[in-house]
Image: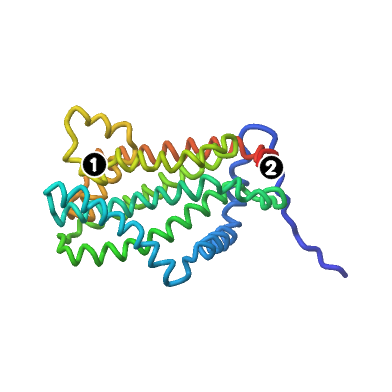
């Protein structure tokens, strides 16, 4: 007697959102695929080699050293706290930046996979976010060593770094999902992205601290979603202070809005990807 193997068919939907319960269930069942796909991307970027991991942390570390020389030393304000702030915020900013750069082409680069395999397409920007997280982890180790060398204060307030990183991941994932979908329709956005991230770098409290901003420019904090996130991060991991509740709530609100809006936009357009990639 022949055995019957159960199979699951991933049915397309015609308009609006897919059946969400079935969609998320399928996504959860494919978590092993997300892990392996992320590992293949990391392997392609030589993450599993010693020199690949060294360059991973050396790049933002050298960048922070250059900015420190240009802005702090030449400016006559040499300060270990300032260098700690600069490095810590650059590392967290790179988590967002790497998620964007990996997510923007996650759908278009997966053209063959999309055309030949039925699966929730949101797995691709999620994989890009997982890759960025794995690239972020070594920088935490480097910064822990760096802050010990600089003699920065240590306290239980630093545990606030955990919810800040979680909010950053939600925020970055929302950006990756959104921009991956937008890039399907407007391919030039991938070329524009480096200018966007560089502008965001200059307008965020990385090369300068939030306390340095002029009162008439405080409205910048309201329109820059990265501003309260990086300010809270600096307070916690550099100064070992409790972050302002308002900054945490604003960061969480930005992260949730971008995540849910981006996910809705992605899922409502997912059915068109096969004919547009």
Q: What residue is disc 1 on?
A: 245
Mark 1 lies on a secondary structure that is: helix
Give me the residue at 43% from left, 43% from top.
194
Q: Residues within 10 Å of mark 1 (few under 14, many from 20)?
A: few
Give me the residue at 25% from left, 67% from top.
145
Residue 277 x %, y %: 65, 42
Badge 1 or badge 2: first in the primary sequence: 1
Q: Is 252 on the left-hand or right-hand side of 210? A: right
Q: What residue is disc 2 on?
A: 274
Mark 2 lies on a secondary structure that is: helix
Q: Is 100 on the left-hand or right-hand side of 88? A: right
Residue 22 x %, y %: 62, 46
- Label 1 and label 2: CA atoms lie apart by 44 Å
Camera-nearest residue between 248 and 174 = 174
CB under 8 Å between discs 1 and 2: no
Q: Is 93 on the left-hand or right-hand side of 52? A: left
**Mark nearer the viewer, 1 or 2:** 2
Find the residue positioned furthest to the bottom: 50
Give me the residue at 31% from left, 65% from top.
141
Camera-nearest residue between 266 and 256 = 266
Camera-nearest residue between 157 and 5 = 157
State the quadrant of the N terminus: bottom right
Numbered badge on residue 44: none
Q: Residue 3's quadrant in the figure?
A: bottom right
Q: Residues within 10 Å of mark 2 (few under 14, many from 20)?
A: some
Residue 102 x %, y %: 50, 50
Give me the residue at 19% from left, 66% from top.
148
């Amino acid at each position: 007697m022949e055995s019957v193997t159960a199979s699951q068919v991933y049915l397309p939907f015609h308009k609006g959102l897919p059946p969400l319960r079935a969609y998320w269930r399928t996504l959860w069942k494919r978590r092993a695929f997300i892990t392996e796909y992320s590992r293949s991307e990391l392997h392609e970027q030589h993450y599993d080699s010693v020199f690949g991991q060294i360059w991973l942390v050396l790049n933002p570390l050298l960048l922070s050293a250059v900015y420190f020389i240009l802005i702090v030393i030449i400016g006559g304000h040499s300060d270990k706290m300032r260098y700690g702030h600069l490095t810590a915020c650059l590392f967290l900013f790179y988590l967002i930046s790497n998620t964007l750069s990996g997510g923007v082409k996650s759908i278009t680069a997966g053209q063959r996979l999309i055309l030949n395999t039925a699966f929730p397409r949101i797995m691709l920007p999620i994989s890009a976010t997982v890759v960025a997280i794995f690239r972020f982890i070594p920088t935490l180790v480097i910064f822990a060593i760096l802050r010990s060398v600089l003699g920065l204060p240590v306290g239980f307030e630093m545990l606030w770094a955990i919810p800040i990183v979680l909010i950053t991941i939600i925020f970055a994932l929302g950006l990756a999902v959104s921009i991956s979908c937008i890039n399907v329709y407007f391919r030039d956005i991938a070329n524009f992205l480096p200018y966007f991230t560089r502008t965001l770098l200059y307008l965020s409290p990385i090369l300068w601290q939030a306390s340095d901003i002029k009162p008439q420019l405080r409205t910048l904090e309201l329109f820059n979603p990265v501003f309260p996130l990086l300010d809270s991060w600096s307070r916690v991991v550099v100064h070992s202070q409790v972050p302002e509740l308002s900054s945490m709530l604003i960061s969480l609100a930005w992260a949730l809005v971008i995540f849910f809006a981006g996910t809705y936009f992605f899922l409502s357009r997912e059915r068109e990807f096969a004919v547009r990639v």
